[in-house]
Image (spheres, rainbow, N blue to C red):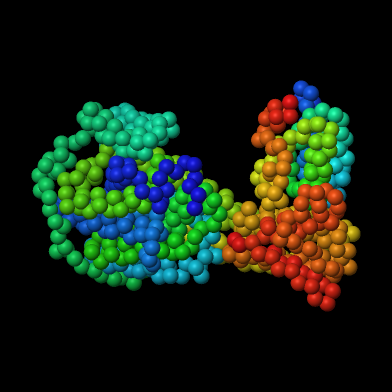
């Protein structure tokens, strides 16, 4: 892997201790925003502050485990990246439904079920790969970026809050977000690496100066014990078949999130990234599913890989897995200090919104980059465009979907559920009728270079193939037709056949005539200049080098060249 | 293939657009040979809008470079990027020519 220019410490690098600690602290600071999802579920069942604090502590331990599991570089579990889980909006609505229907035990039991669904999906990802192409992973990341950005702006503006935002919230947001952006864009070293943490501290400071903290929050914190051990006397699990669909859909959405996040991490750490590494993704989904299953088993809510934390890593350039281990350590310590948990949970909304908005911008752009890494034809444009817009419709017109049947409501909870589900369905429909083999015939007397180029372009777009692979295949096709027509005196038409699957592109050129020379040695400059034979051998040499594999046969007067390109 | 010739401070800039293959290479060859055939000529070939170049095109460039050496002319290529640059690399041509990043840098290098 070649490190991209914007990355300061790549996944395999070991940063200085101070950088690791600073990076871990700001990652935890950002993660703390999502602890609100646990509090929302606990509020739904009317849990006591002590029970909420205990579930919070357990959650922090589970998140610590998840951060370490996800970062493991070897073995069957873990993507190997800084891609830790957080309590997530994906599981919020199903958990609220379960909490209402059967209390916490049903929430926890169904969370175990969802985790196991994700585990099962991780085992089948290789076979399901055509259903999860990169543009859908990119769509998921972009939608999460947009949804996170919308939540961030809503949080800053206080939309739906009991107390609306005022001028002081705007001042806090400008101070916090402004600090993050200024440090990220115009500074280097420690200031850039810790820009979010510094911005959040500035936000806390400005909030305190403006008297933004309520006394009740501090009184709650002071009244708590400094150190405590989480208790498990509320343990219980239940299962309800009617909740299989919402939790199953949430598990699929969580899986798509992991696919998107791990793909982003791969791309962030490799300047030469061209395709998603499914082994790493599969192990990442397994780690995510196991963490959610453990979360349910030890009685807390579902988690999923944190896109905002990947966005933060992208922004600061620190993607080292050492940070993930440090995040695990910080969370494990926090689990035994409920007062610190309270500090995190009373994060001023303008500060939380600013940090989210900062991360959301990077998430969104990363998603767009992944989506557009493939050639997109009309089918794929519809898959992405329709899914994107239908997903956004949920957020724009939340009330408009209320009259839909109950069984479909779990899919209509948010753009980050509807968008990906819609994309999966449309992708399945639009795959119908896509020919995996495209044929073409070229008459030697009427070679049309534009038609040859269009053949590869159109085929590549229909398959959703990578641009660079299609460019290479297009050159080999044009160059081979050119040199065969000029030097091999083909009797009759050249038959061309391109076959594609997600892993391979095979291009076969067949004609009646003598075989084309495909030398392994480049002709000298003098040989190239002196004769057209030298030029032809240069063509053969370039054709051989441009393909990942090449095979040539000559039987019964018919010559066939097979160019293989890895995809 | 389309060719567009301009003068910039004593340097002749030839922009090549489209494809250089066995059909179009002779046209480019004739033009280039004539341009670098005059003693002390300074020529920049701009490939920023080139889509494709085959072995026939590379042969023409080698011949033009050789001719430029004979006439003490200067031949500079510019705008060699993306998939065209990949082909230069593949055929081992990147080190054989003076290649500037932009047209302005090419003119400066030729001047």
Question: Looking at the picture, does residue A171 appear above or below residue B19?
Answer: above
- In the displayed orientation, state which residue is furthest to the top: B9
* Percent of width and height locating residue A159: 34, 40
Residue at coordinates 32% horizontally, 34% vertically from top-left?
A: A199
Question: Looking at the picture, does residue B84 appear above or below residue B39?
Answer: below
Q: Report the number of numbered marks.
A: 0
Left or right relative to B42: residue A304: left
Residue A357 is at least partly visible in this image? no
**Quarter assignment of residue B67:** top right
Foreground residue among A42 and A11: A11
Question: Looking at the picture, does residue A544 appear above or below residue A14?
Answer: below
Residue at coordinates 86% horizontally, 60% vertically from top-left?
A: A487
Residue A273 is at least partly visible in this image? yes
* Percent of width and height locating residue B87: 70, 49
**Quarter assignment of residue B106:** top right
Foreground residue among B32 and A339: B32
* Percent of width and height locating residue A180: 37, 34
* Quadrant (top left, top right, bottom left, bottom right) of the C terminus of chain A: bottom right
Foreground residue among A278 and A41: A278
Foreground residue among A80 and A341: A80
- In the displayed orientation, state which residue is furthest to the bottom: A556
Residue at coordinates 76% horizontally, 59% vertically from top-left?
A: A540
* Percent of width and height locating residue A250: 39, 61
Left or right relative to A525: residue A333: left
Residue at coordinates 79% horizontally, 39% vertically from top-left?
A: B65
**Quarter assignment of residue A507:** bottom right
């Amino acid at each position: 892997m070649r490190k991209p220019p914007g990355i300061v410490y790549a996944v395999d690098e070991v940063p200085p201790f101070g950088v690791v600690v600073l990076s871990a602290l700001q990652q935890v600071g950002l993660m703390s925003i999502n602890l609100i999802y646990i509090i929302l579920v606990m509020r739904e069942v009317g849990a006591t502050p002590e029970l909420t604090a205990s579930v919070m502590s357990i959650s922090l331990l589970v998140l610590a485990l998840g951060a370490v599991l996800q970062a493991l570089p070897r073995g069957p579990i873990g993507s190997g990246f800084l891609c830790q889980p957080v309590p997530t909006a994906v599981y919020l609505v199903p958990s609220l439904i379960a909490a209402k229907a059967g209390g916490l035990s049903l929430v926890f039991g169904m969370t175990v079920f969802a985790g196991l669904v994700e585990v099962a999906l991780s085992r089948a990802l290789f076979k399901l790969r055509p259903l999860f192409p990169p543009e859908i992973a990119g769509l998921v990341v972009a939608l999460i970026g947009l949804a996170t950005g919308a939540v961030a702006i809503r949080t800053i503006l206080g939309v739906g809050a009991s107390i609306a935002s005022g001028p002081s919230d705007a001042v806090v947001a400008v101070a916090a977000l402004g600090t993050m952006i200024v440090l990220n864009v115009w500074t280097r070293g420690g200031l850039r690496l810790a820009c979010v943490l510094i911005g959040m501290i500035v936000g806390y400071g400005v909030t305190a100066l403006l008297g933004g903290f309520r006394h009740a929050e501090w009184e709650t914190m002071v009244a708590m014990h400094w150190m405590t051990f989480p208790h498990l006397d509320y343990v219980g699990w239940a299962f309800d078949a009617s909740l299989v669909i919402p939790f199953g859909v949430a598990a699929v959405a969580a899986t798509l999130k992991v696919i998107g996040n791990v793909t982003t991490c791969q791309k962030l750490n490799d300047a030469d990234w061209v395709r998603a590494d499914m082994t790493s993704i599969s192990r990442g989904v397994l780690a995510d599913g196991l963490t959610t299953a453990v979360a349910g088993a030890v009685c807390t809510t579902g988690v999923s890989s944190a896109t905002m934390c990947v966005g933060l890593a992208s922004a600061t350039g620190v993607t080292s897995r050492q940070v993930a281990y440090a995040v695990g350590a910080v969370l494990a310590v926090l689990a035994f200090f409920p007062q610190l948990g309270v500090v995190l949970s009373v994060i001023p909304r303008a500060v939380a919104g600013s940090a989210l908005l900062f991360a959301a911008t990077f998430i969104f752009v990363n998603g767009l980059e992944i989506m557009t890494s493939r050639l997109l034809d009309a089918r794929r444009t519809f898959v992405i465009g329709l899914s994107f817009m239908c997903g956004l419709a949920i957020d724009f017109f939340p009330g408009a979907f209320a009259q839909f049947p109950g069984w479909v409501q779990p899919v209509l909870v948010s753009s980050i559920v509807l968008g990906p589900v819609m994309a999966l369905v449309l992708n399945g429909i639009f795959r119908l009728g896509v020919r995996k083999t495209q044929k073409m015939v070229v008459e030697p007397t009427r070679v049309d270079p534009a038609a040859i180029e269009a053949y590869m372009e159109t085929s590549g777009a229909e398959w959703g193939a990578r641009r660079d692979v299609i460019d290479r295949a297009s050159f080999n096709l044009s160059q081979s037709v050119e040199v065969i027509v000029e030097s091999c005196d083909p009797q009759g038409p050249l038959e061309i056949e391109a076959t594609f699957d997600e892993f391979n592109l095979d291009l076969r050129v067949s004609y009646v005539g003598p075989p084309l020379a495909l030398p392994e040695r480049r002709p000298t400059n003098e040989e190239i200049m002196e004769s057209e034979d030298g030029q032809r051998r240069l063509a053969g040499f370039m054709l051989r080098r441009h393909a990942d594999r090449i095979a040539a046969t000559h039987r019964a007067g018919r010559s066939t060249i097979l160019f293989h390109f890895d995809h | 293939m389309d060719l567009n010739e301009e003068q910039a401070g004593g340097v002749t800039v030839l922009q090549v657009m489209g494809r250089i293959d066995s059909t179009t290479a002779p046209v480019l060859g004739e033009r280039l040979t004539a341009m670098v055939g005059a003693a002390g000529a300074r020529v920049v070939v701009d490939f920023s809008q080139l889509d494709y170049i085959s072995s026939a095109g590379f042969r023409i460039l080698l011949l033009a470079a050789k001719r430029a050496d004979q006439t003490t002319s200067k031949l500079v290529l510019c705008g060699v990027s993306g998939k065209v640059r990949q082909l230069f690399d593949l055929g081992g041509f990147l080190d054989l020519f003076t290649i500037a990043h932009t047209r302005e840098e090419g003119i400066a290098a030729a001047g």
